[in-house]
Image: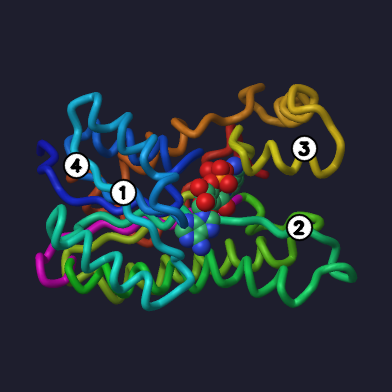
């Protein structure tokens, strides 16, 4: 079963896990819509794809904004073709202990992860059901199991696991699989910002994390991109509604 060339959407693909995933899916032969808040910030990822001979388009959209999502998905269908693969990767953190967490911290994180994945899945799945083939991958996190200072984020990431399982049930008959990846520590701007916020050097922060991880290293964006590539492949068609922890070991 070789992989057909499809149209893939990766949100939050200007950098980090999203950028690595966009590059990987392009290398797998798919045309990739590189979606992020600011269209200009997507250019570097698009350039890396096209200079390697791939096909990609930069699309600016805030995934928590319904109008922006609907027009972005329409534009993607016009420019690249109907999307058959969606990776809900866009994310933010607003960490704080419960007593210091504001309503804005809560709503922002829910808005991007939960509402954003819902809006994107709703818009993109209309094309997938019409084409009778689809793959949706949602980015959860080991924080779904609980993480101090992340009541908003862990709730959102646990919510995405329920969302994944329900969509798998609803969309299966259209030949659409829906799965989630729950990464552990991955070296990106997101984890770098956490190190800065708590006043630990980036090197020490990574070394401290690696010391707790069975494979004795932190994850790289490509570790997640490789797992996305598996889920969206033709041969993973009987794998649906699953959450795979990609964390260098069995627990967070
Ligand atoms: N880095 C980790 O250790 C880790 C661990 C578990 C899960 N994750 C998840 O993986 C995903 C990617 O994380 P990352 O580490 O690459 O983060 P990152 O901060 O490096 O990149 C996130 C991207 O999402 C974009 N984005 C944020 N809000 C958006 C919005 N409303 N609309 C569109 N784009 C938006 C940002 O502009 C940014 O380019 C996130 O969902 C994150 O929660 C990361």
- Name the quarter where the C terminus is drawn: top right
Q: Which mark is residue 195?
A: 3
Relative image position of residue 208 (x, y in whole percent)? 79, 28
| Residue identifier under label 1 | 58
Element marked by disc 3: helix
| Upstream in sequence: badge 1 or badge 4 | 4
Which quadrant of the figure has residue 66?
bottom left
| Residue at horizontal 84 percent and vertical 32 percent from the top | 200
Which quadrant of the figure has residue 187?
top right
Characterize the local packing of mark 3: few (<14), some (14-19) or many (20 or more) Cα atoms within 10 angstroms.
Answer: some
- Residue 109 position (above or below residue 2): below
- Where does the magenta region start and end? 128-141
- Residue 228 position (above or below residue 149): above
| Upstream in sequence: badge 3 or badge 1 | 1
- Is residue 210 found left or right of 9 in the rendered image? right
| Residue identifier under label 4 | 30
Tell me the mark number nearer the camera, choosing from 3 and 1. 1
| Residue identifier under label 2 | 95
- Residue 94 position (above or below residue 102): above
């Amino acid at each position: 079963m070789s992989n057909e060339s499809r149209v893939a959407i990766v949100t939050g693909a200007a950098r980090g896990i999203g950028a690595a995933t966009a590059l990987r899916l392009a290398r797998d032969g798919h045309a990739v819509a590189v979606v992020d808040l600011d269209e200009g910030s997507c250019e570097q990822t698009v350039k890396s794809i096209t200079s390697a001979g791939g096909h990609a388009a930069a699309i600016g959209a805030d995934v928590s904004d319904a109008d922006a999502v609907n027009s972005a998905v329409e534009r993607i269908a016009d420019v690249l073709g109907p999307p058959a693969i969606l990776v809900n990767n866009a994310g933010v953190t607003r960490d704080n202990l419960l007593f210091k967490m504001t309503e804005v911290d809560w709503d922002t994180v829910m808005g991007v992860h939960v509402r954003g994945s819902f809006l994107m899945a709703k818009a993109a799945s209309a094309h997938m059901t019409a084409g009778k083939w689809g793959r949706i991958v949602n980015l959860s996190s080991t924080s779904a199991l609980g993480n101090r200072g992340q009541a908003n984020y862990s709730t959102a990431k646990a919510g995405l696991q329920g969302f994944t399982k329900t969509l798998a049930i609803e969309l299966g008959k259209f030949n659409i699989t829906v799965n989630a990846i729950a990464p552990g520590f991955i070296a990106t701007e997101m984890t770098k910002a956490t190190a800065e916020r708590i006043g630990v050097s980036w090197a020490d922060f990574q070394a401290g994390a690696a010391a707790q991880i069975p494979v004795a290293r932190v994850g790289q964006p490509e570790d997640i991109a490789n797992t996305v590539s598996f889920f969206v492949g033709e041969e993973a068609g009987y794998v649906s509604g699953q959450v795979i922890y990609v964390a260098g070991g069995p627990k967070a």
